Image (spheres, grey):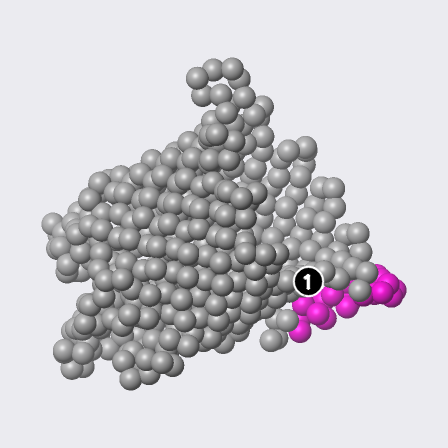
Amino acid sequence: MKKILFLCLFLCLTLPKGILAAPIEDDLEYGGYLKSEFWVRNNTDSRHQFLSSFKDTVDLAIEYKISDNWIFFVHPRYFYDTAYSIRESTFDKNQEKMGHTQRTEWLRDCYLDYTSDQLDIRIGKQQVVWGQADGLPFLDRVMPFDLSYYWLPDFADIRIPLWMLKVEYSPKVDSTLQFLLMPDFEASRSAPAYAPFAFSANNAFEDFKNAVPGVTTAIHRPARQLSNSRIGLRWRSIIGSTEYTLNWLYGYNPSAQTYSEGGLSFSRKHKILQLIGFSFNRTVVEHCLFEGWTLRGEFTYVHNEPTYYGLDGSRQRTQKTDKYAYVLGFDKNFFRNYSFSFQFAQYITDDRTWDGFNVLNGYTYGAADKIENVVTCKISTDFMYERLKPEVLIICTDDGDGRVSFKTKYEAKDNLWFTLGYHHFWGPSNTSNGQYRNNDHILFEIKRTF
């Protein structure tokens, strides 16, 4: 609340006198939606119930144009999940936060925009997006993520907005330098133990704490102060028909790692790391074999990222190491309205070993290769004059695991949408997707926009 009051005070003190005299309704725009979504399992086990989620969401976005250069935007969102009320006697106490909006998370965005020919400034709570890969984050690591439902929802919904300053300066046409200052800190989060999409590593640690008396866990998070701010820089430009970016990010990692403090004491800590990366995007317009294809790619180098080492299923050490990742994408539209996207990606861990231990999967503590290969395919189209929009995303890895996410939206009438989705997982239990191989879900959604 203090941040909102500060932003309002800043607005009052910096805007020219008389600028608010114009009728508000002339420059005020708003929109939003009411949504109900149901997540149900079609293959369940003794630990999980049939109904995973029965969530109602209210979302409102308000934009007020103060002048030609100034805009104020606020975006509240609130949800309540009735499933956790229905199942009060069956869900674990640490799942309580899954049932309703926590703390100030009802405020998704709240910022003040200044725009001009060469300089744009946005101050307030916001999201910043660097990547564009389908279903996987590479450069898109500026914001923390809420993985309570794994990577299944749209990225715009699972990014956690931050209070920050974003400045974009255009020294020449088609070129922009972006500067980010993030004094706010929010940790990435995952589903609590035993929740529908809890990581198997979280469940195993919770089982360990329940079985062994005296286990303690301390959580250490960096203080929200200017000296702990994360900083980001991005240079974006266009050369011919190729758009490219150069990216740099430095600060505390939103993802925490587990460390052994001796005996039965453990801690969760956030470490400082830096990311260096680049991306490119080019559509082939020349008359050749690849005419009409869009080629895109992202590359990241992360220095000193904490990594788990141990034996399959057993974490022994947490050590800093360097990691590399890249993705190449190939996109094209066929038959007018069929959009096809193929991706090949690799995750590479620096060639180190610690006391003979191997690299572990952070989700499951399963043994991981130092080079992990991933391929994805996404196909989308529309029928009935864009009223019916099916889409499918397939993700496969060289570990024999993967998932298929199918979703189709239908506009029954103006502003009323129905969505039917299905998420299917397969693979060994110690892999990222395979941990949910008995956790397939059907999604049904009703959404009314206004």
Q: Is residue 266 left or right of residue 148?
A: left
Position of residue 7 measured from the top left corner of the image (x, y, whole percent): 67, 67
Please name the residue that numbered disc 1 is placed on: 30
Q: Nearer the viewer, residue 182 or 289?
A: 289
Position of residue 401 measured from the top left corner of the image (x, y, whole percent): 22, 47
Task: Let me know if residue 10 is in the magenta part.
Answer: yes
Q: Nearer the viewer, residue 109 or 450?
A: 450
The quarter of the picture where the C terminus appears is bottom right
The quarter of the picture where the N terminus appears is bottom right
Q: What residue lies at 45% left-to-right and 21% top-to-bottom?
A: 290
Within-10-Å neighbours for mark 1: few <14, some 14–19, many 20+: few
Residue 334 visible to an observer of this rendering: yes
Position of residue 93 measured from the top left corner of the image (x, y, whole percent): 31, 81
Q: What residue lies at 42% left-to-right and 56% top-to-bottom?
A: 420
Position of residue 297 measured from the top left corner of the image (x, y, whole percent): 43, 34
Q: What residue lies at 38% left-to-right and 70% top-to-bottom?
A: 53
Magenta stretch, residue numbers: 5-24
The correct choice, above or below, for 329 with respect to 262 in the image is above
